[in-house]
Amino acid sequence: MSEEIIIVSGTNRKAAMSYQISLTYQQLLKDLGVKSTIIDLMLLPDDFSFSALYEHSGKNDAFNKYREMMLNGKKFVFVVPEYNGSFPGVLKTFIDGLEFPNTFTNKKCALVGVSSGIQGAGLALSHLTDIFHYCGMNVLAQKPKLSHIDDNFENGEVINELYMTLLKDQAQKLVEF
Amino acid sequence: MSEEIIIVSGTNRKAAMSYQISLTYQQLLKDLGVKSTIIDLMLLPDDFSFSALYEHSGKNDAFNKYREMMLNGKKFVFVVPEYNGSFPGVLKTFIDGLEFPNTFTNKKCALVGVSSGIQGAGLALSHLTDIFHYCGMNVLAQKPKLSHIDDNFENGEVINELYMTLLKDQAQKLVEF
Amino acid sequence: MSEEIIIVSGTNRKAAMSYQISLTYQQLLKDLGVKSTIIDLMLLPDDFSFSALYEHSGKNDAFNKYREMMLNGKKFVFVVPEYNGSFPGVLKTFIDGLEFPNTFTNKKCALVGVSSGIQGAGLALSHLTDIFHYCGMNVLAQKPKLSHIDDNFENGEVINELYMTLLKDQAQKLVEF
Amino acid sequence: MSEEIIIVSGTNRKAAMSYQISLTYQQLLKDLGVKSTIIDLMLLPDDFSFSALYEHSGKNDAFNKYREMMLNGKKFVFVVPEYNGSFPGVLKTFIDGLEFPNTFTNKKCALVGVSSGIQGAGLALSHLTDIFHYCGMNVLAQKPKLSHIDDNFENGEVINELYMTLLKDQAQKLVEF
């Protein structure tokens, strides 16, 4: 039986493109016979930056649900939109609220960048790689950068063939990683 | 009359070392005849990650107080603790909630790294530099990295002479920047 | 009288696009009434990686010509092509052969990225910024990323209006920096 | 029979500490029953930056020896000294002279940072990770940063126990990677 992969939609913005791409990724994994669950940061408790970190670490039940999922996961996909030249702050705060280092050490992940502009969140993915390597998690070299996403997504589907090829190739590599 | 500098204490952790270093920096600026104000991220509304971003951008009065201060500022100091190999997520979320690009474009800042470990938040400062350059703000080259801060701070004072020299030199350069 | 700016064409590849962009930049500076000199890394001694570094540092006359120019310069432009996801090794070796830290400390520079692909050398510029900040040189926040350069350069001219606007704006800012 | 690992001593400086650490690493691999070969960049042809790149790519016999070794390798260790806040230019030029992308795509590597100062080449390792990920090579998350190396190496041996533990752990993980 195949292991389950956790897909993190890396923003708490409503109706985010990252969530749409997370759904696309889930389907790609399903096509490969691999189960996955999406964690949508939009569903985190509104005050988690204050109520689930530091002295409150591990004490917020609503947040702990996701904390447990991350702790039990073995492989992750992070779908990362570009905000101000890097990843959304809320994604890093989410990471800051997880159990360290057991959530990440010796685990594996794949990163996908998404942007409305031209960069495809390239620097965001570089920054996140630094963070995950610091946490002891291996990051797949292949990191698709989906730039100009608004022109390349329609009716719930990525309509850019190259993007789909890159995502499929990455999903396959993650399964084998 | 000297302009006023805004010092951002880059975490919402209670009794944070970053806040202590911010106080030290404020005194250094005072010694140079420069006024400053500290923004302590601990005082942000608990739910600002949700209530002050995206469609709520600019609509949260409690957050707007800081948004206005940042918009009106010309020079900034960011005191940045190392969390998980980079800066705290809450600092980036704070940036994500500010008016873009007017808060930062053609302004100037200095960065100070703080860590309990050996790295002094080096990667955090590199990541933040990428972000501020993206936002069009110049970053002073000199970025003191205060590693092993717990061994080098006592009774409200930085007791490491090299650290104090680096901070004074940076403060002087920021005033002239 | 205006100060002179040194433009470094960041590769030793023959007939490099970076050299063409350096010529464009020189003209932009001339239009602003500012003199400049181009250092073309193609003209470095073939064996400088071995004959002008470490125990031979400062002892290679052919290299010293450029070493002196860099030491005497106050402001620089680096035109940086993307090789293997970063800057060309030869550009870093050139830097490694210069007098440290006097060549760079408290000086100022602007960076321009050039690529045949989509990234515009974004990571290269981030890496170089880390290096120059380490050396104590301020880097202008605005760093044009000229992607798909082959489609945007014709008969010795950058034919993309946005690129020209970005370069002119950067040149103006560098003069005032 | 175990596969062979290639260790790249990442500088062309004579009597480099990186070479000494490469020898240490070779012994660690031997203890794990794994063969390895060291490529010492000091042995590259003096003019390889000019004679083995671009239109001369693959045409320099003296360089091609190493080019072939890299092309045939499956796993690599890069021992990376810190020069000017990043890796030595010559290491990147070496990479620029290799066959792209077959030398690296879908291969695996481990990075070790070495510095006389406090940083342990942290930014160098981050920059190199960006480069290798661009080239499609997976990089082991664990990257020991051997700071203050002169105080921690004596009579051909790393005398810092923590450093040895980190290197052994990394070597073991690379074998299983």
Image (cartoon, coloured by chain):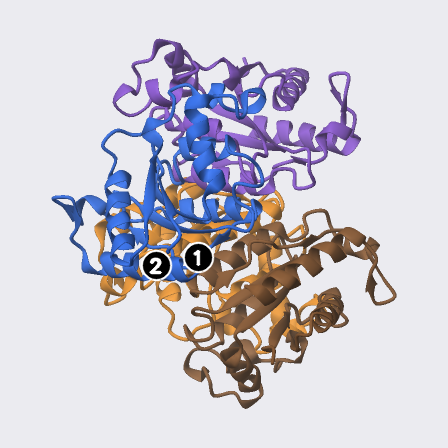
Chain colours: A brown, B orange, C purple, D blue
- Few, some or many C-alpha atoms within 10 Å of disc 2 (few <14, some 14-19, many ≥20)? many
Q: Position of residue D15 (x, y in %)?
A: 22, 32
Q: Which residue is mark 2?
A: D170
Q: CA distance from mark 2 to mark 1?
A: 8 Å
Which quadrant: the N terminus of chain C? Answer: top right
Q: Position of residue B102 (x, y in %)?
A: 66, 50
Q: Would you identify the image quadrant in which residue C168 lies?
A: top right
Residue lying at the far front of the rendered structure: D1
The kind of residue tagged 1 is: Leu
Q: Chain of mark 1?
A: D
The answer, for residue C169, to whether it is visible in the render is yes
> Residue at horizontal 33%, vertical 27%?
D43
Q: Secondary structure at mark 1?
A: loop
Residue lying at the far top of the rendered structure: C61
Q: Which residue is mark 1?
A: D140
In the image shown, does B37 or B9 lie closer to the viewer? B9
Of marks 2 and 1, which one's residue comes earlier in the chain? 1
Residue lying at the far bottom of the rendered structure: A61
Q: Position of residue B34 (x, y in %)?
A: 42, 49
